[in-house]
Every structure is written in structure tokens, then in C-alpha cells.
Image (tube, rainbow, N blue to C red):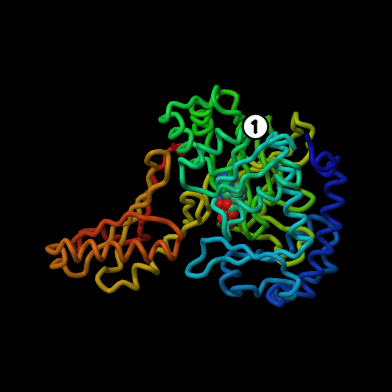
Amino acid sequence: MIWAKEETLPRSEIEAIQLSKLKDTVRYIYDRVKPYRDRMDAAGVKPEDIRTLEDLKKLPYTYKADFKENYPDGLFAVDKKEIVRYHASSGTTGKPTVVGYTRNDLDMWLNNVARIACMGGATADDVAQISFGYGTFTGALGLHGGLEKIGASVIPMSSGNTNKQIMFLKDMGVTLLVATPSYALHLGEEIRKRGIDPAKDLKLHIGLFGGEGMTEPMRDEMHKVWGEQFVCTQNYGMSELCGPGVAGECTELCGMHVNEDWFIPEIIDPETEEVLPPGERGELVVTCLGKEALPLVRYRTGDMTRLMYEPCKCGRTTCRMENISGRADDMLVIRGVNVFPTQIEEVLLKIDEIGPHYEILVERKNRLDVMTITVELIDDRLLDSYASLSELEGRIQKALKSQLGLATQIRLVAPNSLKRFEGKAKRVTDLRKDGL
Ligand code: DLL
């Protein structure tokens, strides 16, 4: 099922919508958001200079750092009383990235999520279990609202509590699972350990995944665990842009269709900031069209991908983005949570007993991401006291949990035992190969 006629328009009509909305958006931000106005003035661009889609290139980029500088709502274009929902993502140093929605924004967002749910095969007959963590993360409430729009029955399960997840999957006849791909694999294996064969004993046949990447080997693994009947698609989004609903894979499984009447994607070289020709791989930059609370122009997502404009067998004419192949910056996505090494550093530097050197190791154990942080003690006398060591370890874990919202493993080592770097420090080792 195709949710909206805009998904199948000829390219010329998609572009006409984009241009008309772009002109309005640029005028809107110039009039309402001071940081944009200042930056456009500095670049010598006025709203009336935007006459064609090519003119988009004249506009300055927006960066994650702009959220930090304008925390919490300095980039908002409406008065607080018009905001009906806030969400926030992890990921910037110290403070979260706060995003807001007006009533119209929520409607636009959830309609876009309804589209991607339909792309993945969801219908009004589905019983959907949402196993993303509820809270300020956009994933859970986004999919929740989008699936309700198409008339599916939604179970707001949240993450964790494997036994309860499995009980609901079985007893409620769940047909559709929403989760991060790593959690879906973990859950599938736990189900098998309990002697349940998903292909025979469950009704589950759709997986709507996102929040982190799913490689093709992971998708193969998903079929081994959940059965061949299981069609799982991946979905891309970002809190700043709205959350999920930016792009989604259809059941042809050949890239994620971008909801182009609401988002203009560009691909740039992250070093030179030059726009690359269609089909080349680079950093994805997105302009949101028609958003009221938090309009974003040329937002540097940091995600590396490629756009494909060839028609898709599903009938949609919107361009498709390839699986995200990595990040242009050092952000890590761990269990769907965005983590910058600087956030970890900030926590560690506040703890007196440890030095400024650290190493981060990310592995996948039992299908789940595990992050181990090795830190140096300042005084090796502490190594003689088990009680003090474990108290310190607990304290670091607690501080990191409250900063990142993630559990970590801590390894304390003797002073001067970690490698020192002469150039750029290589603090992160990511051993997650193919996501398995
Ligand atoms: O992860 C929004 C979302 C939720 C999308 C649920 C899809 C489903 P943030 O927490 O702001 O928002 O994290 C955004 O996560 O810049 C990517 O680096 C990464 N990411 C999200 N989806 C994918 C995906 C949500 N399908 C950041 N593949 C993004 C690879 C993804 N990376």
C-alpha cells in the first residue's frame, strides 16, 4: 500500500513542490530565527535570492554545534505556547539536542511515519509491538503514532524485559515488530533459546527497524532467527529532522525512499563541503520543508550515503538512499543511542582518581553492543584495594549512565599503561563487523 500520492509524482512535480516549499521555508527562517538571519546576512543571501532548487547551494549549512550554541530552543521559530511536544536526542556534549513540534508538525511527522510503515508492508490488520525505548527518543512515539494513523493495533512495549516481550509476541498474535536491528536479533535468539520457532509458533512477519544501521549480513541473520517469512526493512531518520519518517525501505529492499516533498537531500564532500553529483557517496545534508517549530536548512547529518534516482519497482518515484555506510565525524551509535567520545571524556575528566587518558572498545556480544572504557588511575596504590576500586568503577559507571543513558563496562588500569599518541589520538576501537 502507498500512503500518499506525493510518493508517486513525476520528478518535475516533486521538484515543483520542493521549490515552492523551499522559498516559503527560507523566508520563514529569515524572518523568525535570528541565528539563520545572521548567517544568511553574513553570506550575503536574501530569501528572494532563492529562485530555483539550484539556489539551495547559496544557503549556509547548519551544524549539530548550532543546537549546542542555541540550547535549548534558540533555533525554534515559534513561541513556546505553540509547541505541543518536545523530544531530545543524545549526542552532543553535555546537553541533549532538544527538538519541538507544533500540532501541524506532529501531523506531518506521523504522516511521514505512516508512509514508511506502509513501505515496509504494514497495514491496518497488523498488531505492532514497539520495542524501542519510550521517552524522549523519537523512535518509539514516532512509530507508535505513524502505525496508529494507518489503523494498526499498537502495543507500546518499550525496550528491555525479554520475557514480557516474548509473552506479548506470542499471546497477542503480534505481526509486526519495531526495534533496533541489534535488539531484534537479540530477541530472536532469546526466543529460539526458549524452544519457540517464530516461523511456526508466532504470527510475526514484518520488522520495521531503524535508529541504527542494518547490514545485509545482519538481514540474512534476521531471516535465520525469525524465519524466511519475516520481511524486515530499515528506516532512517534523526531527531533534528523530525525523528523516523525521513526515509524508509520498501519491500523491494533496494534503498530507503526519501519523503522528498518534505525533505530535500543533498550529498556533499564532508571535507570540502562541495555538493557532489547524483549517485556519488558522501555526507547527507537535509533541508526540511514546511516545518513550523524547528525548520532546518542544509543540516549536516554526518551520515555517509549515496542517493539513487532510478525508478523503483514499487511504483514510488522518490529517490532512494543507500544504507548508511558510516559517519563523517566520530559519533558512535550504540544500541541506537548516539555517543560522541567527547561526552565520555567530559564525564571522566570530572573524576579525581583517574587521568585524562582513555580507550573505548565497542563490541557486539550476544547480538548487543557492549562498550568497554579503559581508564588510567592517577595513583597505583588504589590497585591494592579491591573495595576502593569497585567503588570507583561503580561511580564512573553511574556518571556515564546519567550522561549517555547507557550502561558501560569500566576497566581501571595502572598509571601510564595506556598508549600515548603523537598525532591524533585513536581512542575508539569498533569491532562490530557487519553488525554481527
Ligand atoms: O534514531 C530516529 C529514528 C528512530 C530513525 C527510529 C529510525 C527509526 P536520533 O536518535 O537523533 O534519531 O539518531 C539519529 O542515528 O544520524 C544515524 O547516525 C543513526 N541512524 C538512524 N537510523 C539509521 C539507519 C533516530 N536506518 C542518528 N541506519 C542518525 C543507520 C541510522 N543509521
Is residue 108 visible in the rendered image? The answer is yes
Q: Is residue 304 visible?
A: no
Q: Residues within 10 Å of mark 1 (few under 14, many from 20)?
A: some
Identify the residue position indicated by label 1 in the image: 253
Where is 285 relative to 1, above or below?
below
Q: Is residue 134 left or right of residue 22?
A: left
In the picture, measured across the screen, residue 321 lies left or right of residue 179, that is right
Foreground of the two, 112 or 53? 112
Give the quarter of the figure containing the C terminus. Answer: top left
Q: Please, is residue 222 above or below residue 37 in the view?
A: above
Above or below, 31 relative to 421: below
* Viewer-nearest residue: 124 or 266: 124
With 248 as the anchor, is 376 left or right in this view?
left
Residue drawn 83% across the image and 58% down it: 21
Q: Residue at x 63, y 51 (%)?
A: 237
Determine the residue located farthest toward the front in the rendered image: 171
Q: Residue at x 60, y 51 (%)?
A: 140
**Residue 154, percent from left and from top:** 66, 44
Residue 26 lies, with reference to residue 188, above or below; the image says: below
Question: Residue 230 at what x, y percent from top left?
Answer: 59, 28
Location of residue 257 in the rendering, given as x and y in whole percent from the top left corner: 71, 41
Which element carries disc 1, helix, strand or loop? loop
Q: Which amino acid type is marked by label 1? A: Leu
Would you say the beta carbon of the disc 1 residue lies within 8 angstroms of ligand 1? no
Going by the image, does 383 lie left or right of 397? left
Foreground residue, 392 or 249?
392
- Quadrant location of residue 359? bottom left
Looking at the rendered image, the quarter that the N terminus falls into is top right
Residue 52 quadrant: bottom right
Looking at the picture, how far across and down is residue 130, in whole percent?
59, 45
> What is the count of numbered marks?
1
